[in-house]
């Protein structure tokens, strides 16, 4: 395994760290929505089996909420990236290099480091 160093904000860090964070975020981004939707489907299945209209309405609401949460979890990486990009905006021409460094560092942690 290569121990490549990447420059992140003037600090050299091993490429293993951004790659681990990338795979952790990717796992969260995929695993949690799937779990939320499956749990919602199980609740809805139980409600349908019970033939109780009130329980079906309650579980239908839960299913919709879980689907919304699943979409939000899936999109959280894009939202965080956008917010950080806005916060790290440049005030003058002197900070153009700093913004590029911040964007590159964020890119390493979100998309991983190509080796």
Image (tube, rainbow, N blue to C red):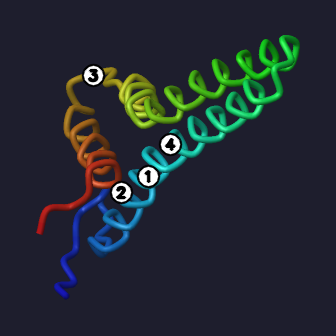
Q: Residues within 10 Å of mark 2 (few under 14, many from 20)?
A: some
Horizontal side, residue 108 vs residue 27: left or right? left
Mark 2 — residue?
A: 22
Q: Residues within 10 Å of mark 3 (few under 14, many from 20)?
A: few
Horizontal side, residue 97 vs residue 64: left or right? left
Compare residues 72 and 80 and report the one nearer the observer: 72
Locate residue 28, reporting x and y percent: 49, 50
Q: CA distance from mark 3 to mark 4?
A: 44 Å
The answer to which of marks 3 and 4 sits earlier in the sequence is: 4
Residue at 21% in and 32% down: 96
Q: Is residue 60 above or below residue 45?
A: above
Tag 3–tag 4 contact (CB < 8 Å): no
For the view shown, which residue lies furthest in the left direction? Answer: 115
The answer to which of marks 3 and 2 sits earlier in the sequence is: 2
Q: Is residue 42 above or below residue 50?
A: below
Q: How many badges with numbers are in the image? A: 4
Mark 3 — residue?
A: 92
The answer to which of marks 1 and 3 sits earlier in the sequence is: 1
Residue at 73% in and 24% down: 48
Mark 1 — residue?
A: 25
The answer to which of marks 2 and 4 sits earlier in the sequence is: 2
Residue 88 image-quadrant placement: top left
Q: Residues within 10 Å of mark 4 (few under 14, many from 20)?
A: some
Mark 4 — residue?
A: 34
Compare residues 47 and 77 and report the one nearer the observer: 47
């Amino acid at each position: 395994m290569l121990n490549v160093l990447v420059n992140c904000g003037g600090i050299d860090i091993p490429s293993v760290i951004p790659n681990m964070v990338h795979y952790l975020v990717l796992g969260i981004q995929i695993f949690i929505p799937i779990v939320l939707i499956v749990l919602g489907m199980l609740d809805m299945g139980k409600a349908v089996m019970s033939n109780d209209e009130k329980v079906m309405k309650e579980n239908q609401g839960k299913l919709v909420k879980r689907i919304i949460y699943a979409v939000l979890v899936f999109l959280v990486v894009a939202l965080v990236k956008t917010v950080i990009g806005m916060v790290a905006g440049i005030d003058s021409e002197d900070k153009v290099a700093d913004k590029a460094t911040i964007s590159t560092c964020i890119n390493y942690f979100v998309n991983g480091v190509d080796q």
